[in-house]
Amino acid sequence: MSKRRTPLGWLQLKHDRGRLLVALAGIAFADVLMFTQLGFQRALYDSNTRLSRALKGDIVLISPRALNLQNLASFPRRRLLQARDVPGVIDAQGIYLNTLTWKNPQTRLNATVQVLGFDPDGQVLSLPEVVAQTNKLKLPDTILFDRGARGKYAKTIARVDKGDLVTTEAERRTLTIGGLFRLGASFGADATLLASDQSFLRLFPRRDPGSISLGLLRLAPGSDDNLVAERLRRHLPEDVKVLTAAGYVAFEEGYWRTASPIGVIFGLGTAMAFVVGMVIVYQVLSTDVNAHLAEYATFKAMGFRNRYLLLVIFEQALVLASLGFLPGLILPLGIYVMASRATALPIFMTSSRALFVFMLTVVMCLASGAIATRRLQAADPAELF
Amino acid sequence: MANGSTSAVLIKRLQHHYGDGALRKQVLSDIDLEIQAGEIVLLTGPSGSGKTTLLTLIGGLRQGQSGSLIILGRELIGAPANQLTLARREHGYIFQAHNLHRSLTAQQNVRMALEMRGDLEADEMDERARAMLHSVGLDDQLEAFPDQLSGGQKQRVAVARALVGNPPLLLADEPTASLDSRSGRDVVSLMQRLAREQGCTILLVTHDNRIFDVADRIVAMEDGRLLQH
């Protein structure tokens, strides 16, 4: 039962419940902030790469002027034909992409959505609901609508689910919602519509059919993506950028991570939460050291080394980190659910994030403990008598 | 331990001063003192006579400056800090205030003195802490926190903590100052009885003339000098 060492740090914390609660609340607060910031940051990256990840292709062609999915620029459709000449490439599909102001079928108010236009016979998206419904796109001015869209679409979605024919207007044309699929909103777009290339070009009559936004190449089974990509780079002119599927997802994420301020802001928010947590833990630990200075000096007089007292403080830091992390982990679960309902963004807890924040918490507490140990110098056994 | 010598404390021409330059103040001058192993010595004198400074030097709580200070066969003048820490482990201390740890029970407080030595199993430490509290008459207060004990009880826990490790030397500074005369008397008798059983040398700083009778010898100090021997 009894252990070799008296867990002095823990007993000290337990003895002063008020101080313990303040410390745990502070750590939990910092953890909740960190989880929120990191969760939003991940949601930013996930939501903005969701479409990129759903593309069915081994190699993606974009314009060298492309910034992100919402700003892709365009390049000549001819490049797809040229790409087919390269050994290993067995199929090439083009996608038109543009933003469209349409009337929300439910509220009849204008809303901005992004529209993808592609050949319904060529498979470009790997989403099963899309694969099953591409035939519907062959009807003129018929589109598939994103069930995960942000905005007031619940009634529209319910009607489509019931089998009603829902129509709305955009660019003075009448669009029919032929079916639903699930993609989800992102920071770049509230909703996504899928259309055939024909319907797309009718919506945007001034768009040059020879300029596409995105090219998708399928490779022969067993080919090396990087090798073929290298061949394509040599074969195709400078007006097109060749990326592997993974490279394209990284390109999209890279824009939000570095070029857009949003990724940086969440990173800064996390750092701020870390500092706030560190200050709180430092306050608690140094107050605790101060309150026990006479006791610590007594221990020194009894022959305990300074090292022993350092260990007591680090023990306290670790206990605080572990206990404070629990509420700091549980509260964000609720916040994630609420935030993801409110924003239609994919915000959820991951075990790697939990581990990361736990490690940050431990580092935060140990660093505060290390600063608090400086107060130990004041414990002088000669002053005891 | 005393390694062939029978002196627990052997002090020659010990000097000590506080401050530097114009503020330099001599607090101990030419102290010569020898205490035999097993002796109980009381150190008395008015405030500011240097008693406490002498006690902290003997206890290894303060770095000595000049002269010779051999405690339990170990020279403490010029000894590095870690040697002083090791020397302290041979001493039991009783302070004017009990200085028990508020977050620890009576038993845990006593056990800490054994834990520091690092040579006992957990069960044995618990057993010895309980036995020691039994001998100071606190069997029923093992799990009590210091706040739940009276002043006399706290000081008895402090005595138990000081003596549980069988130290060859016990140093006490005004152990009865914060106690009423009866509990003060009890605590001192307890110290005397236990020290006799363990063969422990005691140096006790006190003003309290009601306890002078426990001493083998009384040493008085004034203005940093010993008056009689």
Image: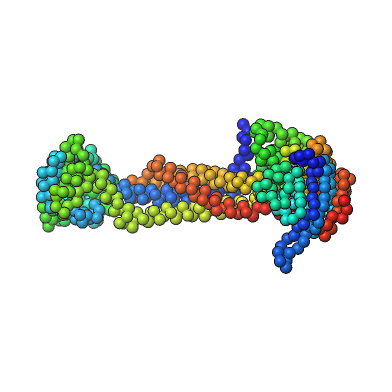
Q: Position of residue B195 (x, y in %)?
A: 80, 39
| The residue positioned farthest toward the bottom in the image shown | B22
Instruction: Please give the name of the residue rendered at 64% of the width and 46% of the height, measured from the top-left corner.
Output: A305
User: Quadrant location of the N terminus of chain B?
Assistant: top right
Instruction: Please give the name of the residue rendered at 54% of the width and 43% of the height, measured from the top-left corner.
Output: A319
Instruction: Please give the name of the residue rendered at 62% of the width and 38% of the height, measured from the top-left corner.
Output: A5
Q: Position of residue A231 (x, y in %)?
A: 16, 45
Q: Position of residue A154 (x, y in %)?
A: 28, 46
Examine the rendering and report whether any part of residue B166 can be seen: yes
Examine the rendering and report whether any part of residue A344 can be seen: no
Of residues B175 and B17, the one drawn nearer to the viewer in this rendering: B17
Of residues A92 and B196, the one drawn nearer to the viewer in this rendering: B196
Residue A330 falls left or right of residue A119: right
Of residues A116 and B152, the one drawn nearer to the viewer in this rendering: B152
Instruction: Please give the name of the residue rendered at 65% of the width and 33% of the height, measured from the top-left corner.
Output: B122
Looking at the picture, does residue B193 appear above or below residue A279? above
Q: Position of residue A45 (x, y in %)?
A: 32, 49
Residue A43 falls left or right of residue A34: left
Scheme of image coloration: rainbow
Residue B148 falls left or right of residue A128: right
Count of marks, rendered view? 0
